[in-house]
Amino acid sequence: MSRIGKSPIKIPQGVSVDIKGHEVKVKGPKGELTRTFRPEMKISQKDGVLVVERDSDERLSRGLHGLSRTLLFNMVKGVSDGFEKKLEVTGVGYRAVVEGSKLTMQLGYSHPVEIEIPKSMKVEVGKGNVITITGYDKQELGDFAAFVRDKRPPEVYKGKGVKYQGEVIRKKAGKAAGAKG
């Protein structure tokens, strides 16, 4: 049995879970999320705890067990606490600013890069050009952070660009000067 799949999920105070067949709706102080799970998974709520069970020991069911539990846990955690990703903008003249509902970045192009911020997320730019993205949907948050990073991924020679905070960029050595072969 899946070690992750069999562990129960505690429902925090202020979070309500509505299960209708294979559709689960989780509502909390940060927002509301809905997801339809595969029919192989049985989700039940008992005494403020969510339990994910599978109907058979087939390979597909075993694979979906831990995944379904993790997706459900992320829904509950997202609507109660929320998620956060931080991106660093590194480079001379590179900067980011939030203007209304748009993130505007100067990334060395001849024009500023403008990105519309989704309604379910909040974006702030702090000291040192650190972009903090917060939201309650983990998948949507990760997709948006990856979209922002793709506008100028970190360059391998100098390390300038947009990178996740804590991401290690392996820098390459430059051209050897004056080497004759």
Image (tube, rainbow, N blue to C red):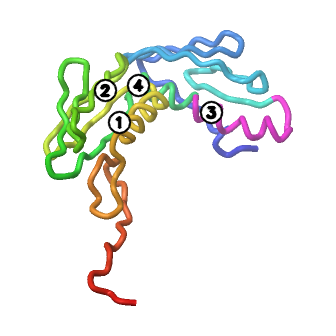
Question: Residue 37: percent from the left, percent from the top?
Answer: 68, 22
- Which disc, if any, is residue 69? 3
Which residue lies under the disc numbered 2? Answer: 115
Prevalent SS, magenta region:
helix
Amino acid type, mark 3:
Arg
Badge 2 marks a residue whose secondary structure is: strand
The CA span between labels 3 and 4 is 17 Å
Viewer-proximal residue, 125 or 42? 125
Is label 1 in contact with label 2 (beta carbons under 8 Å)?
Answer: yes
The CA span between labels 2 and 3 is 33 Å
Badge 4 marks a residue whose secondary structure is: loop
Circle 1 packing at 10 Å, graded few (<14), some (14-19), many (20+), is many
Which one is earlier in the sequence, the residue at label 1 or at label 2?
2
Q: Which residues, given as a range, are shown in magenta?
A: 55-71
Marks 2, 3: nearer the viewer: 2
Badge 1 marks a residue whose secondary structure is: helix
Question: Residue 18: percent from the left, percent from the top?
Answer: 58, 11
Circle 4 packing at 10 Å, graded few (<14), some (14-19), many (20+), is many
Which residue lies under the disc numbered 4? Answer: 136
Quadrant (top left/top right/bottom left/bottom right) for the N terminus: top right
Which one is earlier in the sequence, the residue at label 2 or at label 3?
3
Badge 3 marks a residue whose secondary structure is: helix
Marks 4, 1: nearer the viewer: 1
Question: Is residue 166 positioned above or below 101 on the image?
Answer: below
